[in-house]
Image (cartoon, rainbow, N blue to C red):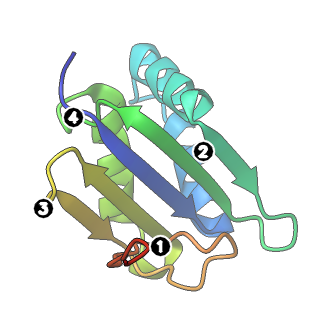
C-alpha cells in the first residue's frame, strides 16, 4: 500500500531541455532512465504549451519517495535548475504534508497550491 501523494511538476522549455540532457547523460543508468521515462508516462495529465514549450505533469495517488531512483533524479534536476525554470507541488496524505519548490509562478498551466474554507448550505 504505502504513503501516497498528489504531485505536480511544471518545467519551462529550458527546464525540459535540462531534463532531456540529464536523461541522455551516459552516467545515468539505463534502469534509471527507463524508470524516469515510465514515471513521466504514468502521469495522469501531461500537457505541453505550444507557445512557450513549457511542460506540466500531474500524478494522482503516487508513491513519491525520495529514495526511489526516478524520484531522486527529478529531485536532483530541481536542485540544478534555476528557481524560475520549474514549479513543484506535492500534497501528501497527512493534512500538513505539503512541499512547494521553484519559482515558475506564472506558468501557462496555472499550477498552484490552493487552500480554502468552504461552508455548506446553512439552515
Looking at the rendered image, the disc whose residue lies closer to the viewer, 4 or 2, is 4
Chain-order first, disc 3 or disc 4: 4
Report how far apart the C-alphas of labels 4 and 2 lie in the structure: 22 Å
Q: Position of residue 4 (x, y in %)?
A: 27, 34
At a point 29% along the width and 27% down the height, the residue shown is: 69
Please tell me in which quadrant of the rendered image residue 120 appears.
Answer: bottom left
Q: Nearer the viewer, residue 57 or 12?
A: 57
Looking at the rendered image, the disc whose residue lies closer to the viewer, 3 or 4, is 3
Q: Are marks 2 and 3 in contact (CB under 8 Å)?
A: no
Q: Are marks 3 and 4 in contact (CB under 8 Å)?
A: no
Dot 4: element: loop
At a point 27% along the width and 39% down the height, the residue shown is: 72
Q: Is residue 31 above or below residue 15?
A: above
The residue to which callout 1 is attached is 112
Looking at the rendered image, the disc whose residue lies closer to the viewer, 2 or 3, is 3
Residue 52: image tag? none
Q: Position of residue 118 (x, y in %)?
A: 37, 75
- Tell me: 22 left or right of 66: right
Q: Are marks 1 and 4 in contact (CB under 8 Å)?
A: no
Which quadrant, please, contains the N terminus?
top left
Q: Are marks 2 and 1 in contact (CB under 8 Å)?
A: no
Q: Position of residue 12 (x, y in %)?
A: 62, 69
Q: Nearer the viewer, residue 55 or 111?
A: 111
The residue to which callout 3 is attached is 96
Q: Are marks 4 and 2 in contact (CB under 8 Å)?
A: no
Please tell me in which quadrant of the rendered image residue 73 appears.
Answer: top left
Looking at the rendered image, the disc whose residue lies closer to the viewer, 2 or 1, is 1
The residue to which callout 2 is attached is 20
Amino acid at each position: 500500500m504505502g504513503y501516497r501523494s498528489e504531485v505536480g511538476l511544471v518545467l519551462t522549455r529550458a527546464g525540459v531541455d535540462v531534463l532531456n540532457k540529464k536523461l541522455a547523460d551516459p552516467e545515468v543508468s539505463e534502469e534509471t532512465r527507463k524508470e524516469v521515462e515510465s514515471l513521466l508516462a504514468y502521469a495522469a495529465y501531461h500537457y505541453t504549451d505550444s507557445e512557450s514549450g513549457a511542460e506540466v505533469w500531474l500524478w494522482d495517488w503516487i508513491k513519491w519517495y525520495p529514495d526511489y531512483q526516478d524520484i531522486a533524479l527529478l529531485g536532483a534536476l530541481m536542485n540544478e535548475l534555476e528557481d524560475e525554470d520549474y514549479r513543484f507541488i506535492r500534497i501528501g496524505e497527512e493534512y500538513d504534508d505539503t512541499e512547494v519548490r521553484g519559482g515558475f509562478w506564472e506558468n501557462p498551466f496555472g499550477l498552484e497550491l490552493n487552500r480554502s474554507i468552504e461552508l455548506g448550505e446553512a439552515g
